[in-house]
Amino acid sequence: QVQLVESGGGLVQPGGSLRLSCAASGISFSLYAMNWYRQAPGKQRELVAGIASGGTTNYADFVQGRFAISRDNAKNTVYLQMNSLKPEDTAVYYCNAASTIGPRRVYWGQGTQVTVSS
């Protein structure tokens, strides 16, 4: 069974930092692109960052250089380092895995809450 399990969310002050982790099982991790999405109440789910199998990264405009996505294939884990956090970053953050070969396969984690507030 495929499982994506997020961790590392919580409450942080504006300007603070947080590192999210997503541990994957049940997939050939190195063959999947990994992504972080987020969704605030009443808002559309939006892409935050993505990393391809070969390590190429992409970021949403609102990241403004504050976040960094990385992956450790030996640990089947993808990370999102978030710095200079703002209140508008408050959302549920979701891990996403997308297959790069063969049939389309997309999997989602259950999300982890990030709250930026003083």
Image (tube, helix red, strand yellow):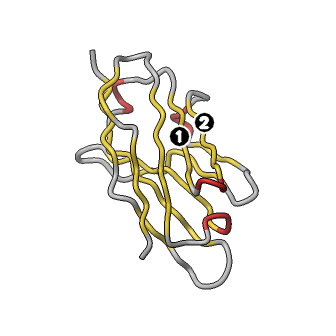
- Residue lying at the far bottom in this picture: please name it: 103
Vertical placement of residue 33 versus 17, above or below: below
The image quadrant of residue 70 is top right
Locate residue 107, reporting x and y percent: 45, 68
Q: Residue at x 35, y 30 (%)?
A: 88
Q: Residue at x 61, y 71 (%)?
A: 28
Judging depth in this view, the residue of 29 and 100 nearest the camera is 29
Vertical placement of residue 16 versus 107, above or below: above
Judging depth in this view, the residue of 61 and 14 nearest the camera is 14
Real-space Cα distance between discs 1 and 2?
6 Å
Residue under label 1, please give it: 80
Residue 19 in the figure: left or right of residue 94: right
Locate residue 23, reporting x and y percent: 48, 54
Q: Secondary structure at mark 2?
A: strand
Badge number at residue 89? none
- Residue lying at the far front in this picture: please name it: 74
Mark 2 or mark 1, which is nearer the start of the sequence? Answer: 2
Residue under label 2, please give it: 68
Identity of the amino acid at label 1? Leu
The image quadrant of residue 16 is top left
Identity of the amino acid at label 2? Ala
Category of crowding for the residue at label 1, using alpha-carbon neighbours closer than 10 angstroms: few (below 14), some (14–19), many (at least 20): many
Are the residues tagged 1 and 2 within 8 Å (C-beta)?
yes
